[in-house]
Amino acid sequence: MVILSGTASDANFKSYRVEFGEGDSPTDWLKTTPRPTTSPVEDGELLQWLAGKRSGVYSLRLTVEDQVEQQRQAQVRFSITSLTEKTTGGDVRSADGGVTLYLPPNSLQKDTIVTVNRIPSSAITWPLGSSWQPLDLVYQLVADPLQLNRIKPATLTISYGGAGLRPGQQPTIFRQVDNTEQWQLIGGMVNTSRQTVSTAVHQLGRYGVMEMAPVQADSSAQLLEESLTCQPRVFSPIGRRAPNTETTISFQLDKSASVGIKVYNVAGGLVNWLAEEQTFSAGKVAWPWNGRDHQGQVVATGLYIVAVTVGGETQTKVVNVWNQ
């Protein structure tokens, strides 16, 4: 259900009507109700519209008419998001295309609507004296409830292309602490060719991309205990037998660290070296593996071991590549 609120009144008010159309600038407008409404509204509810199974971007147009048939119109744009099923999860994208939120199967507690909406940076009160500067890339991730399955984190990917990143700075994802003006560093893996930054998240809420100076690895850094996950655990690089063509390797660091990420077959042979002593900032990291070896060839169907090493500590997870 879409609830439209506002004002429809005039000294010589006669009626108002609300129509809807698909897209930002519809050419065809359809009635939301069989006939116009003849009672004026002052800053209240104008309409409860049952959108049915529609999803995507739509527009609502309000037309107010007075006794001499003069009219005034106002139009709003909105997005209808379909229900995300708990058992299958899937991708949720923002209307501006800047964010993709991948939800693994059974990461949600129930079937629910998940939305990703951009928040203007000018609408936020930023803390003073921070070591980072906000880019105009803030998004509100909403679902009921906000908390996700702890062992099945979602993957949040935000595009920073065109955001005016200053030379010598790197993009990093932060989360606003609930009901405060403070922001907590989450971290993220930067893909410079795609101009995206990705991280694993265990809860929804308000996330933003900040620019900060590149970090230096701390020799005392540790991989947080049991923080390594791979979602989904079963995937198909050729997309035949599983809905996902890659898995996301996510883990959490207590400090900035030099990290190695490798993939082995069950016989112990090295299949791919995804990251070789690469420095990541403290927080959560999300790194994709597309089921290919170091030569770019799709690996055979079977089990593979993902190993993440920080200092002398290594954590492992097993994933299943299924191409038959």
Image: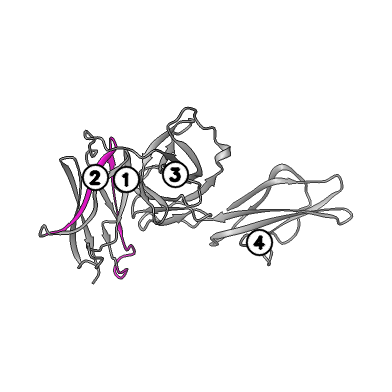
Identify the residue position indicated by label 4 in the image. 25
Q: Which residue sits at x=26%, y=60%?
A: 234
Q: How many marks?
A: 4
Direction from residue 53 to residue 61 in the image, left or right: right
Query: Does 104 sit above or below residue 31?
Result: above
Q: Amino acid at mark 3?
A: Pro
Where disc 4 sits, the SS reads: loop
Using the image as rendered, state which of residue 101 and residue 264 is in the foreground.
264
Q: Which is more N-terminal, label 1 or label 3?
A: 3
Q: Give the x, y percent position of residue 324.
A: 23, 72
Which of label 4 and label 1 is nearer to you?
1
- Label 4: few (<14), some or many (≥20) within 10 Å? few
Outermost residue on the front side: it is: 167
Neighbor class of circle 2 (other Cα within 10 Å; few <14, some 14-19, many 20+) is many
User: Which is more N-terminal, label 2 or label 1?
Assistant: 2
Q: Are marks 2 and 4 in contact (CB under 8 Å)?
A: no
Residue lying at 45% horizontally and 40% vertically, measured from the top left? 210
Cβ–Cβ under 8 Å for marks 4 and 1: no
The answer to which of marks 4 and 1 sits earlier in the sequence is 4
Q: Kindly report the distance in space between the C-alpha atoms of the residues bearing marks 2 and 4.
A: 49 Å
Dot 2 amino acid type:
Val
User: Do the numbered discs 1 and 2 sit on residues whose CB atoms are within 8 Å?
Assistant: yes
What's the mark number on residue 285? 1
Residue 318 part of the magenta segment: no
